Image: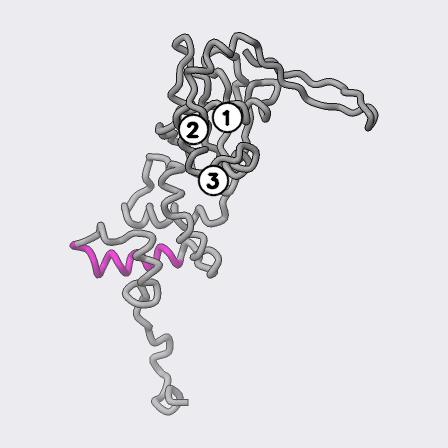
């Protein structure tokens, strides 16, 4: 139904390279299947698609080029992912994250059941979850890994998924920015384990950071027992 090709166009402004999208008349038989907003959003995606049937416009971009509200665009995308023509999907959504784990704009595949898409691009349908290893190159990642190991008492075999990482990363980033080290995390988690041994479920990344300088703070020890009283008061 959709043909994408690149070429040259000529006009009053001269010669320039351009991309073209060709829509077959066959689509007219299925327009009634779309909701009005669904068709507008679908055509906006078509205008952004590459030669492999893949595109990644942000919600903001789709709002700008369709004139629809953000809520309407999101509703239309959800509708399109469940829509079928001749029992085949017309759209699949691929949640995308940057190397540091931040959520970026989604990727979209047109006609995922009909096109032989590139193997490097993995698609999950809207509403499903994809378990992946957290981005281990993140400088704050060792802090969370140490936290999990200390709380459990051993090195967990299960990988840290993106979903789990996203739920704690903001707090972990705050800790890393404050100069906290894995040894600091290990030390203060052990303090909480000693105090909250009957309620270990209370020990989370957020509760650790919240009580970092209170309940989780180790007791001060006197490093020099021979220090005189006068020297202490100085």
Dot 2 lies on which element? helix
Distance CA(mark 2)–CA(mark 1): 9 Å
Disc 2 or disc 1, which is closer to the eye? 1
**Mark 3 closeness class: few <14, some 14–19, many ≥20 residues within 10 Å:** few
Residue found 21% across the figure and 52% down from its top: 200
Of 107 and 43, nearer the camera is 43
Of 53 and 69, nearer the camera is 69
Secondary structure mostly seen in the magenta stretch: helix
The percent position of residue 3, horizontal first and vertical second, equals 60, 13
Per the rendered image, the range of residues in magenta is 184-198
Q: Is residue 214 left or right of residue 105?
A: left
Q: Is residue 185 magenta?
A: yes
Residue lying furthest left: 198
The mark found on residue 40 in the picture is 1
Label 3 with label 1: CB-CB less than 8 Å: no
Q: In the picture, residue 212 is in which quadrant? A: bottom left
């Amino acid at each position: 139904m959709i043909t994408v090709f690149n070429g040259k166009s000529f006009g009053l402004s001269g010669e320039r390279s351009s991309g073209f999208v060709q829509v077959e008349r066959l689509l007219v038989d299925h327009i009634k299947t779309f909701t009005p907003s669904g068709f507008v959003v679908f055509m906006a995606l078509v205008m952004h698609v590459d030669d492999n049937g893949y595109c990644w416009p942000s919600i903001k971009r789709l709002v700008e080029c369709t004139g629809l509200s953000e809520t309407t665009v999101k509703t239309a995308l959800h509708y399109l992912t469940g829509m079928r023509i001749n029992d085949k999907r017309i759209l699949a959504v691929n949640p995308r994250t940057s190397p540091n784990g931040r959520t970026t704009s989604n990727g979209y595949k047109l006609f995922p059941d009909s096109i032989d898409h590139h193997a490097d691009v993995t698609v999950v349908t809207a509403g499903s979850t994809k378990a992946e290893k957290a981005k281990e190159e993140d400088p704050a990642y060792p802090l969370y890994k140490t936290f999990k190991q200390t709380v459990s008492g051993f090195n967990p075999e299960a990988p840290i998924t993106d979903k789990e990482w996203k739920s704690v990363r903001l707090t972990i980033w705050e800790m890393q920015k404050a100069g906290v080290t894995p040894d600091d995390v290990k030390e203060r988690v052990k303090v909480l384990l000693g105090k909250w041994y009957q309620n270990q479920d209370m020990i989370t990344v957020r509760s650790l950071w919240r009580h970092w300088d209170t309940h989780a703070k180790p007791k001060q020890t006197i490093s020099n027992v021979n220090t005189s009283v006068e020297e202490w008061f100085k």
